[in-house]
Image (cartoon, rainbow, N blue to C red):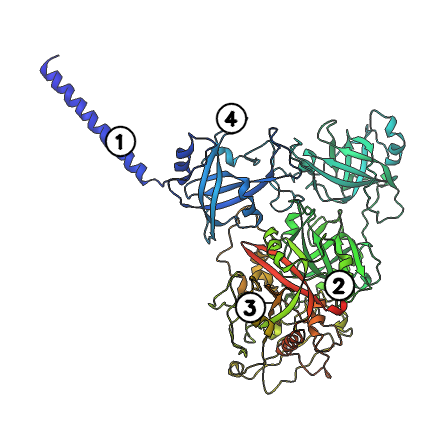
Amino acid sequence: MSGEESQSGSSLQNSEEKQTGVVGEVIRKAAAQEPKSWIQMVLQQIIGSPGQCVSPCEVVPVTVLAVQRYLLEHDRRERPSQYPVYCYDVTISDGVYQEKCWLDTSLNSLVLQNILKVGIRMRISRISCLYNEERLDQGILCIGGVHCGEALDDISLEIPFRNSEHQKKPERPLRGERSHYLALWNNEDPYGDIWLTNKQPEDYNFKHLKLISLSRLETTWSRRNYFPALLVRVLYKSKLRYYGKPHKKVTEPYQSFLEIADRSGTVTAIMWNDLCSQWYKSLRTGLVLLLQAYSVKKSYPFRMQPTPANPNIKIISSMEINLNIRDPPTNIMIIPEYQVKPEWGLPKLNHRFITREELEDKPRNYICDVVGILSFVGRVQRSKKTEKHEDFWSYRWIHIADGTSEEPFIVELFSTSQPEIFENIYPMAYFMCTQLRVVRNNNVVPRLLYLTTTNESRVFLTGQKGQPYGHEAKVKKFIRWVKTKTESDKLKNAVIGGYYPYPPVPSTFSKYSRSSKVDSLLTAISEVKKVVEDLQYREQKRIAIQGIITAIKYIPHRYASKNTSALVTPLNTSQPSASQPIPEQSPSEEINGKQHEGDRPASSQDFQTTAASLSPSKKKRILQAPCGKLIAVPQREASSQTNGNKVDTSGMVQCQKSSTADNIRNIRFIKDRWESQLLKEKRPSLKDHMKYSHVHPESIPRKFILEHKNFLTQQYNSQPSKYIPPEGRPPKLQEFKSARSLGHFEVTILNLNHEIAIDVAFLPMFGPEDVQTSQVDTLLTCMNYSCVYPPATPSSEQSLNPRAVAGDIIKAAAELDRVHIIGILDICNLGNNKVEVCLQKIYSPKKTP
């Protein structure tokens, strides 16, 4: 090679090296400008040490986007558990990627207490990597230690998943062989994308089809190897039943009961497993089905079939039809109604609609259907199916007005496997519920009368097309009545959420002890803290304690001007926690004194009796309304003059108006607290003083505002499994006016050994019943009914003064100084380390057994 060539080659090489260096520098700069993913950094740190839990080199906050529950199969190497243990997959975002992680079961309590939830900022302090050797995918992140922070206002859902497997449909749990997730808070609701809704009616040529009647099948099924097709109508459909067990490898362990009928009778058909996810949400009562390739078995002897509304239909209870995805694979077809021929004789779908007026005469356990407008929708709560189990029922209390009575239907509404309705009902909605059972007891005071759902209950928001009740006369009558009501009529009686003390406890402790289902009738005050800690999210429990009332303090509402809307601008007031002592106030409080968060007043025009304006008659007094009904009686503003406002015959009470706001600020009221000498003496030597008297915003029933329907329904629903972006800038719950008019009380109870004290809340409501009571018995009476009954007034011209009633209650408490009482406490875990402990009733020693 010549020197020139050598020099030329050297120059070319140097030029290429310089270009390569420039490109490399550009790539490095570009990489430096790209967002740094904490998830990727952690994976690089732990990928080589599977199963080893380490602390990340850098702990940064991530956002929780989803918390999903499922049942993990039993590990054959471990001893089988008596009860199922559920697992949770948690989807997080670091701002660059999303990642689905497995939550170590030692942290399950954070989910069960609703501390680890969607929409919060979370720091992960311990993490590991786990490989599933039965799947060809990457390892999964396992969260072993976290610190849960506050909820975030602005969360992006547009961030991609790092692992594309995590966004495939249908969603599948990270671990185990289950093909689906469960609903987060119960097992009855269908959850996830395995539940199909696309089954539609199909035309069918019946020319060469061989059919068999149910009555013929009943007499011949045991001798048959082949079963001809069934042509039936669905009369009833049950909620889902989940029967999954850790040691049973059934991918979708569900069943649902259908009551199907032809002209010869009605029988139970059981839909099993994968067939439920394919058909459950598409089937509804009233549909005509063609069933082929089913199986027949002897019926389960202890299951009670629902009684048909038509008494002429024969109930076939000796056999049951089984519908499966295999062995054999059942073929289900929905026949369009226009193809149904009269000569088939299929029974019509009949209902048992009753009005609220007719309910008065219906016996206990009577099955009925109701339709009306919702005037109160309570929060979703949960109750354990068995004491040592993680399975819960979800339920809420609702009030339904139908225009035939001044009193509403009171309904205990359990989840009916229709979360799309159960989680979205709201006051002012037109609502229908079928197969309700009457619960009544005329031998207690107040009389107990309400409705509760059954296994076959279905709920509907009326107005939806295609529902099987449009021809019913009572439904048409209700629609005609409700059309006569203005939006303001419906809105002023609409209440949502809060503590709802229903049904009331019996009038005597001996009756309470007979009706109690718990193993231990009385709970020591020292054990209350453990009861509180053991409760799961939205679980409510009732206990009885013994003690001495040693202090009571009245916490009034702050007054609003008469022009204030139902949404109140909050003030910047400090908020003590449930574990901190409540700041002392002066014995004689002014109206504009400090109040607790969550207690807001309503203007005078808002205080109306529930469903009163929806009543068709003004002649019947509302004094007969049940105590459980939410009643708000207005506060009387202090004034030297009144405007002559009267109490009308329907029980509505108008507020008396003060001349100016300055008059309110300068007026002081009667003493609003009392403390016994016994508490003053024993306070320094107390071993423990538990503070549970704080009333959280979630405990207060709120005046409903239609414009904020979505926000309010979300607040009183259960925590969602996936993050739902808010609509605009959401308000705060405490900004909405309270539907209560009296405020609340803080009550201190000292245990019988004078060693431990507990502060609890008492949230009374004014009740309309005309109960004669002495001042000394006021406290006992109001707690008997969870309502406050003011003394009878000599004239309907006289308005009720909440302060005066509160003063009577405080005086009554003082009369019980050093007297042993039994208190009934309602305890509810509100989630996120918030607990509600409310005194529902006290029994005097005279009434104990």
Give the residue type at disc 1. Answer: Gly
Can you identify the residue that label 1 sits on? Answer: 24
Q: How crowded is mark 1: few (under 14 residues within 10 Å), some or many (20 or more)?
A: few
Residue 671 placement, left or right of 336: left
Q: Residues within 10 Å of mark 3 (few under 14, many from 20)?
A: some
Counting from the top left corner in percent of width and height, residue 679 is at 58, 70
Counting from the top left corner in percent of width and height, residue 833 is at 54, 55
Counting from the top left corner in percent of width and height, residue 741 is at 62, 72
Q: Which of 580 and 523 is in front in this view?
A: 523
Residue 422 placement, left or right of 370: left
Can you identify the residue that label 4 sits on? Answer: 136
- Quarter residue 70 falls in: top right
Q: In the rendered image of this protein, does residue 136 appear above or below residue 162?
A: above
Q: Disc 1 and disc 2: Cα gap in Å? A: 83 Å
**Residue 277 seen in this snapshot:** yes
SS at circle 3:
helix
Q: Disc 3 and disc 2: Cα gap in Å? A: 29 Å
Q: How crowded is mark 2: few (under 14 residues within 10 Å), some or many (20 or more)?
A: many
Q: Nearer the viewer, residue 683 or 383?
A: 683
Circles 2, 4 touching at the beta carbon (< 8 Å) = no
Of the residues under marks 2 and 4, which one precedes in the sequence?
4
Counting from the top left corner in percent of width and height, residue 484 is at 71, 66
**Could you say which disc has been placed on residue 509 in the image?**
2
Give the residue type at disc 2. Answer: Phe
Considering every residue shown, the one lying at the far left of the view is 3
Q: Comparing marks 3 and 2, which lies closer to the viewer?
A: 3
Q: Which residue is drawn at 49% across and 64% down?
A: 575
Residue 509 placement, left or right of 35: right
